[in-house]
Amino acid sequence: MKTLLLARHAKSGWGQGDDFERTLSERGESDVKAMAEYLQECGYIIHQIITSDAVRAHTTAQEYQRQLSPKKHLITHHDLYNASKQDILMIAKNISSQESTVMLVGHNPGMHEVLNYFAQGKVADMPSCSVAIIQFETDNWEDINNENGVLLAFEYPKKISH
C-alpha cells in the first residue's frame, strides 16, 4: 500500500520579482500551518517530502516537514517547478519503494492535472494550499496509476476552517 499526498504550494505574494522567487503571503503562511496541523490531527506521518525548488513551494514543504515529517530531510526537485502531469507522474513513479507515505509539493496546472488523472476527473479546482490524499493498492511506486488509486480526501484551508 502506498499513500501519495499531492500538495499545491500555499498562497504567495505578487509583484516580488520573478516567479521562481515569490515568497508566501501572510495568508499563505497561516494556511499552510493550519493545513499541517489538520493533517497531523488526522494522523498522517509523511515518510518523504519532495518539493519544487521555487521559494513558495519549498517554504510550504518546510512547514509540512516540521509538523509531519520531522526526522526526514526535504528533497528538492527542480523538475517539479511548473511540471507537467507527465513530469509529476515520472517523479512519483521513481520514489523508492521503501517509502510508503510521500508528499509532492508543486504548482498548478500540473498538480491539478495529476490529481484529476488519479481521481478520474472528479476535482474541479485545486486551490492554493490544497492537499489531495490518494492511496494505491500496490507495493511499488512504479505501478501507481489511475486504476489502483483511490482519492481518500481532498482538503484545503477554506474547507477545514468551516
Image: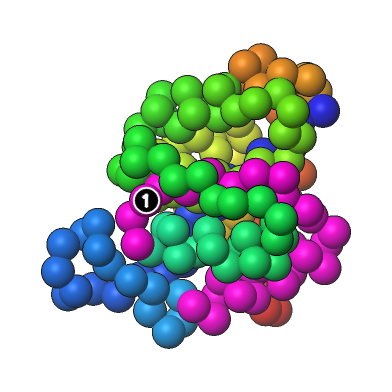
Q: How many badges with numbers are in the image?
A: 1
Position of 19 with respect to 68 (left or right) is left
Residue at the image point whose x is 49% and y is 29% from the top = 91
The answer to whether residue 58 of the structure is visible from this angle is yes
Query: Quick check: 113 above or below 95?
Result: below
In the picture, the quarter occupied by the N terminus is top right
Q: Residue at x 37, y 51 (%)?
A: 53
Where is residue 139? Give x, y as percent. 78, 20
Judged from the image, the secondary structure of the residue bearing numbered disc 1 is loop
Could you tell whether 82 is left or right of 117 in the image?
left
Q: Residue furthest bottom?
A: 26
Position in image of residue 64 (x %, y %):
62, 62
Q: Position of residue 8 (x, y in %)?
A: 48, 54
Boundaries of the magenta span: 29-55
The answer to whether residue 45 is above or below residue 116 is: below
Quadrant of the image occupied by residue 41:
bottom right
Residue at numbered disc 1: 53
Q: Which is more toward the observer, 140 or 135?
A: 140
Q: Position of residue 5 (x, y in %)?
A: 64, 45
Is there any visible trace of residue 158 in the rendered image? no
Residue 32 shown in magenta:
yes
Image position of 104 (left or right of 24): right
| Amino acid, disc 1 | Asp
Q: Which of the 4 image quadrants contains residue 30?
A: bottom right
Return the residue found at the far top.
143
Q: Is residue 40 above or below residue 115?
A: below
Instruction: Work out whether residue 63 or residue 1 is closer to the camera in this orientation and state it.
Output: 63
